[in-house]
Image (tube, rainbow, N blue to C red):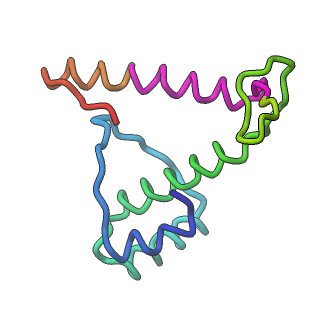
Amino acid sequence: MKVNDLVQLWENTASGQLTQSTYTIQLPIEDAAKLAALAEMYPKRSLENLMTDLLNAALNEIEGSLPYVKGSKVIAEDELGDPMFEDIGPTPRFLTLTRKHLARIREQQSQDTGTTVPSH
């Protein structure tokens, strides 16, 4: 999801699987005012939902902006038969660490609830 998609999402509301963990943050007062303005504009969304959506959009944008660094190893060929080289930049590490923490969080939630948390 991109930041640009949030307004449409908020207009229609959204749902998704949430962690059992909560996070406490302190906001700069300017950001708190902007968040309050969004909450007033989109009363179907709680402050927590708005913050969750904003954080999700920001994380997706960060992931998409991580630089590709061309490695020396050919991992595939594109549709024209040209070689595609492995990415040795931060993206593969970010994705590996994300999968590691996702598995840990799902396992913890499964243990806490006694149920299996579905993967997507």
Q: Is residue 60 above or below residue 33?
A: above
Task: Answer with the quarter of the image where residue 89 lies.
Answer: top right
The residue shown at (21%, 17%) is: 111
The residue shown at (19%, 24%) is: 116
The residue shown at (44%, 57%) is: 53
Q: Main secondary structure of the magenta part?
A: helix
Check the image and name the residue furthest to the front: 80
The part of the chain drawn in magenta is 85-103
In front: 106, or 88?
Answer: 88
In front: 50, or 62?
Answer: 62
Q: Is residue 98 magenta?
A: yes
Task: Classify the position of the C terminus by image quarter.
Answer: top left
Q: Position of residue 117 (x, y in %)?
A: 24, 29
Q: Position of residue 37 (x, y in %)?
A: 47, 78
Q: Is residue 18 above or below residue 88?
A: below
Q: Position of residue 95 (x, y in %)?
A: 58, 29
